[in-house]
Image: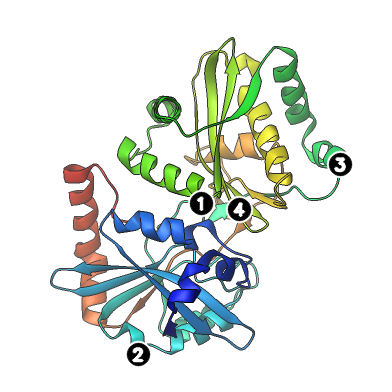
């Protein structure tokens, strides 16, 4: 593994799209530079596998008393355990690291997890990203066929929202629209009880990714009031439902259904062929008691197929430091970030 050249960093996103996984939005240059403002140093690497060169964004953070923590958000962009093991075999660049965290989008079904363990990796206690399990909608092909693939109730709700006067539009990244989007996310947080980072955090990456032509903000409105919003991202042929929110009022209008449909249509017009709805329960834990079950119930209207990835794995290069970090270092850092910065560690 070698550092990317200045020219390679200049066309970084092209290299990410050329990865075996087709590119991941959290491996892009915009995401790396965004995280620079939040305690991480983005570093850009080119790694070799049998099949291809792989462009990898590693975020690095110096942890006092431990050393460097390396983290590849939703990367590296390989598709199987063998390629991941090969990519991590050259550890010369990681000599200052005590721990390397990876979370490639390797499908869990059929993955050779024993090969990862033999290479010294171990499953993280907690996954960093909540999208270990997701629903990916194939939005390529014919538009009528795509709509017909949704559940009948989902199609009905899309048409109902349109008939009752819900309107969906792509909106610019203005101060007013950013404030509206955050307020809708906060309204959802009040109902669902999840942790919500500060407005400054979201504003920064929304603006960066929109400026990189990798994202768009959408509102679903009724009589001039925003009922729901989606911040959708895309790179290469892949798109993601990155952020969203809605109010409880006028839920009978089914605005979120029409909103997602129009987002899919917009992405299709930009050559995107798969739309990742992000964050549903693991397929083995599909129960009404699961905290993500409400999200699954909505998203499964577009497709019932759950994709489970292998999640976050740790490569402890200094075993004692890695164990200490896992037992008390990381939990303490998470608590401090929440209480002092109203933020998460990763």
Question: Which of the 4 quarters of the picture holds residue 251?
Answer: top right
- Residue ID for mark 2: 92
Q: Say left or right for 98 vs 277.
A: left
- Residue ID for mark 4: 283
Q: Which mark is first along the chain, 2 or 1? A: 2
Sort mark 1 into few (<14), some (14-19) or many (20+) by Cα contacts within 10 Å: few
Q: Residue furthest left?
A: 65
Sort mark 4 into few (<14), some (14-19) or many (20+) by Cα contacts within 10 Å: few
Mark 4 and mark 3: Cα distance apart in space: 26 Å
> What colour scheme governs how the chains and residues are painted in the rendered image of this protein?
rainbow
Mark 1 and mark 4: Cα distance apart in space: 34 Å
- Residue ID for mark 1: 212
Q: Secondary structure at mark 4?
A: helix
Q: Secondary structure at mark 2?
A: helix
| Residue 29 place in picture, x, y as percent | 45, 61
Q: Residue furthest top?
A: 223
């Amino acid at each position: 593994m070698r550092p990317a050249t200045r020219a390679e960093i200049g066309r970084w996103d092209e290299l990410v799209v050329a990865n075996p996984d087709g590119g991941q939005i959290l491996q892009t240059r915009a995401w790396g530079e965004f995280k620079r403002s939040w305690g991480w140093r983005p570093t850009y690497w080119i790694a070799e596998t049998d099949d291809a060169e792989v462009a990898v964004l590693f975020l690095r953070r110096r942890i006092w008393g431990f050393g460097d923590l390396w983290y590849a958000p939703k990367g590296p962009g390989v598709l199987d355990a063998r390629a991941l093991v090969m990519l991590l075999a050259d550890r010369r660049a990681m000599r200052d690291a005590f721990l390397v965290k990876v979370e490639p989008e390797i499908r869990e079904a059929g993955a050779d997890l024993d090969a990862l363990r033999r290479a010294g990796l171990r499953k993280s206690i907690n996954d960093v990203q909540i999208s270990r399990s997701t629903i990916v909608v194939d939005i390529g092909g014919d538009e009528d066929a795509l709509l017909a693939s949704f559940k009948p109730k989902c199609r009905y709700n899309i048409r109902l929202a349109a008939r009752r006067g819900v309107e969906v539009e792509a909106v610019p990244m203005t101060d007013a629209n950013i404030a509206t989007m955050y307020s809708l996310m906060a309204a959802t947080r009040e109902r669902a009880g999840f942790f919500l980072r500060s407005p400054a955090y979201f504003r920064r990456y929304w603006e960066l990714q929109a400026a990189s032509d990798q994202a768009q903000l959408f509102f679903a409105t009724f009589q001039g009031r925003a009922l729901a919003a989606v911040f959708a991202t895309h790179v290469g042929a892949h798109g993601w439902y990155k952020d969203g929110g809605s109010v409880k009022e006028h839920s009978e209008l089914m605005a979120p259904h029409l909103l997602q449909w129009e987002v899919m249509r917009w992405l299709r017009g930009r050559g995107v062929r798969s739309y990742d709805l992000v964050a549903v329960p693991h397929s083995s834990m599909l129960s009404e008691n699961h905290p993500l079950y409400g999200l699954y119930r909505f998203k499964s209207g577009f497709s019932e197929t759950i994709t489970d990835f292998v999640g976050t794995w740790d490569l402890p290069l200094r075993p004692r430091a890695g164990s200490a970090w896992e037992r008390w270092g990381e939990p303490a850092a998470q608590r401090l970030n929440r209480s002092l910065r109203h933020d998460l560690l990763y």
